């Protein structure tokens, strides 16, 4: 729901802020996101240890882990907020190509966003506590409400004639309310929660696990925001707006399934602790089979229809500048998605160092490729740099972890999970590409071709990807619903 709300409101936000204003908004968001590299990812250690402690009914230990994590994130948020507030004038004037007419607004927005950074850190940690308790329903419902309301309220603020500063103020207030609601949810889940400080051994265990997970988080945050910082410095805020719209569309759509796979981290820890590796392997194969096809289907629709999609959403200028970026970023996101489940299983099995080292190496090499791409070919070069890094490190990671830290052979995974979904999606891509090229003469033709392509993807998925037992279950469920 938040992803759909964000996608639906992007054109309205761009229209309300203007291309340069939206580029500045993207830049502020990227800078704030980049400051999150100081987060040492204690959420990962907390999720792992809270899950185990809660399963053993160790209520005092759960309280100790939670209080330690909350304190760490309070300190991280405070340090980051102070640093961001103090560095705002330098960032706006010396580092990025912010026009002189927008420099004052940029400083004001960055300083306000510093408070949002502090609240965002607390929000991030509190959101992880229900997940450690395997109560994704609680964290998901709260996130759905706030993640849907904030984009809608952002549009309302702009329609009332307000600007970027007011938009950021809205998000800061929403983050504060989000923290309060999450805290109430945690108190309901843990009614016996009391402030308890952990001993040295528990603190060391949490920090030891989190230290390696931090490498992955550091790399992911750096890589996720650095491209925008590079584009903002070398190209300017207008070019950044074109890139951000296309990249955000690809990221939002292809990032949806990561929500589905997130449950594998605590689940893997529980299954591995119980020695149920065969059960874990079966669940991993089935989840990969379905998630790969869902992502491949979304890739087909985004890549094939990149130009008409951007034309319909943002206008001809955005389509001319961003269609290739959208197609390349969608493909890059799909390749990256192949590592999501293996990473979660690898970390749940207790090997976060491996995934952390890979993520850090990918970020460093990826940043070099993106910088070279932007310097030589602008925003399209950035997209090519992303894709090349994704291909190189995804293949390497899959080869290294399978059969070692992930208890499934890569050959079995390719035959059972990758081949059916990617093959079926390729058939649909050929049809959609030919139809879009030969028969698309306007918006009605585009809508009809896209609808037929989606129906073909659903049919091919049901025939070649969905397993027989699941087809029978689905059909029985449909009949039961129809009968009811």
Image: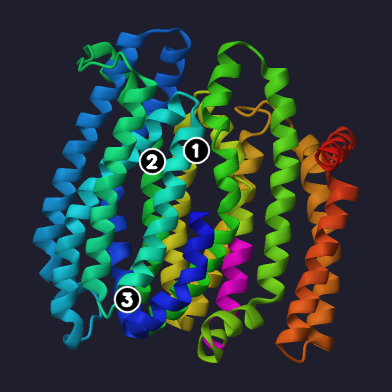
Nearest the viewer among 437 and 115 is 115
Find disc 3 in the rendering and name its residue: 158
**Disc 2 to disc 1: CB gap under 8 Å:** yes
Q: Is residue 86 left or right of residue 313?
A: left
Q: CA distance from mark 3 to mark 1?
A: 42 Å
Q: Main secondary structure of the magenta part?
A: helix
> Can residue 39 be seen in the rendering of this structure?
no
In primary-sequence order, the first of circles 2 and 1 is 2
Badge 3: how crowded within 10 Å, few (<14), some, or many (20+)? some
Q: CA distance from mark 2 to mark 1?
A: 8 Å
Magenta-colored span: 320-332
Badge 2: how crowded within 10 Å, few (<14), some, or many (20+)? many
Give the SS element for disc 2.
Answer: helix
Residue 355 badge = 1
Find disc 2 in the rendering and name its residue: 215
Residue 91 drawn in magenta: no
Give the SS element for disc 1.
Answer: helix
Give the SS element for disc 3.
Answer: helix
Q: Position of residue 468 (x, y in %)?
A: 90, 36
- Quadrant of the image containing the C terminus: top right
Q: Position of residue 271 (x, y in %)?
A: 60, 18
Relative vertical location of residue 477 with respect to residue 83 in this rendering, above or below: above
**Disc 3 to disc 1: CB gap under 8 Å:** no
In primary-sequence order, the first of circles 3 and 1 is 3
Relative vertical location of residue 242 with respect to residue 149 in this rendering, above or below: below
- Which residue is pictured at 63% across the width and 11% down the height? 275
Badge 1: how crowded within 10 Å, few (<14), some, or many (20+)? many
Q: Is residue 220 left or right of residue 20?
A: right
Relative vertical location of residue 78 with respect to residue 94 in this rendering, above or below: above
Relative vertical location of residue 180 with respect to residue 92 in this rendering, above or below: above
């Amino acid at each position: 729901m938040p992803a759909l709300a964000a996608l639906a409101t992007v054109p309205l936000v761009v229209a309300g802020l203007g291309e340069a204003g939206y580029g500045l908004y993207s830049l502020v968001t990227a800078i704030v996101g980049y400051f999150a590299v100081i987060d040492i990812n204690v959420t990962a250690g907390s999720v792992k240890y809270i899950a185990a402690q809660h399963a053993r009914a160790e209520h005092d230990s759960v309280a100790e882990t939670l209080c330690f994590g909350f304190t760490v994130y309070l300190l991280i948020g405070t340090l980051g907020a102070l640093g961001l507030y103090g560095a705002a004038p330098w960032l706006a004037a010396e580092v990025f190509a912010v026009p002189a007419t927008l420099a004052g607004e940029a400083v004001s927005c960055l300083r306000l966003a510093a408070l949002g950074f502090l609240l965002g850190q607390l929000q991030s940690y509190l959101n992880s506590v229900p997940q450690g308790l395997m109560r994704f329903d609680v964290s998901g419902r709260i996130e759905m409400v706030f993640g849907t309301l904030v984009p809608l309220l952002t549009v309302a603020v702009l329609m009332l004639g307000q600007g970027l500063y007011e938009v950021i103020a809205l998000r800061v207030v929403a983050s504060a309310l989000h923290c309060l609601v999450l805290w109430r949810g945690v108190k309901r889940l843990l009614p016996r929660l009391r402030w308890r400080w952990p001993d040295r051994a528990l603190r060391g265990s949490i920090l030891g696990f989190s230290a390696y997970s931090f490498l992955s988080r550091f790399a992911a945050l750096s890589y996720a925001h650095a491209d925008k910082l590079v584009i903002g410095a070398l190209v300017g805020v207008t070019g950044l707006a074109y890139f951000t719209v296309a990249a955000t569309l690809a990221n939002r759509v292809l990032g949806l399934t990561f929500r589905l796979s997130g449950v594998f981290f605590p689940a893997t820890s529980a299954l591995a602790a119980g020695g149920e590796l065969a059960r874990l392997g079966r669940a991993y194969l089935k989840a990969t089979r379905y998630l790969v096809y869902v992502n491949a289907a979304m890739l087909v629709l985004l890549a094939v229809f990149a130009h008409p999609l951007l034309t319909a959403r943002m206008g001809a200028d955005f389509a001319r500048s961003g269609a290739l970026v959208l197609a390349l970023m969608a493909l890059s996101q799909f390749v990256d998605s192949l590592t999501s489940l293996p990473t979660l299983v690898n970390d749940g099995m207790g090997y976060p160092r491996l995934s952390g080292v890979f993520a850090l190496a990918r970020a460093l090499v990826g940043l070099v490729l993106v910088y070279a791409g932007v310097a030589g070919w602008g925003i399209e070069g950035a997209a090519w740099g992303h894709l090349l890094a994704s291909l190189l490190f995804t293949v390497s990671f899959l080869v290294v972890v399978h059969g070692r830290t992930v208890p499934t052979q890569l050959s079995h995974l390719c035959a059972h999970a990758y081949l059916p979904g990617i093959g079926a999606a390729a058939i649909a891509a050929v049809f959609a590409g030919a139809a879009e090229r030969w028969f698309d003469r306007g918006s009605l033709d585009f809508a009809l071709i896209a609808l037929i392509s989606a129906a073909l993807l659903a049919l091919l998925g049901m025939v070649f990807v969905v397993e027989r037992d699941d087809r029978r279950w689905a059909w029985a469920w449909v009949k039961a619903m129809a009968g009811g």
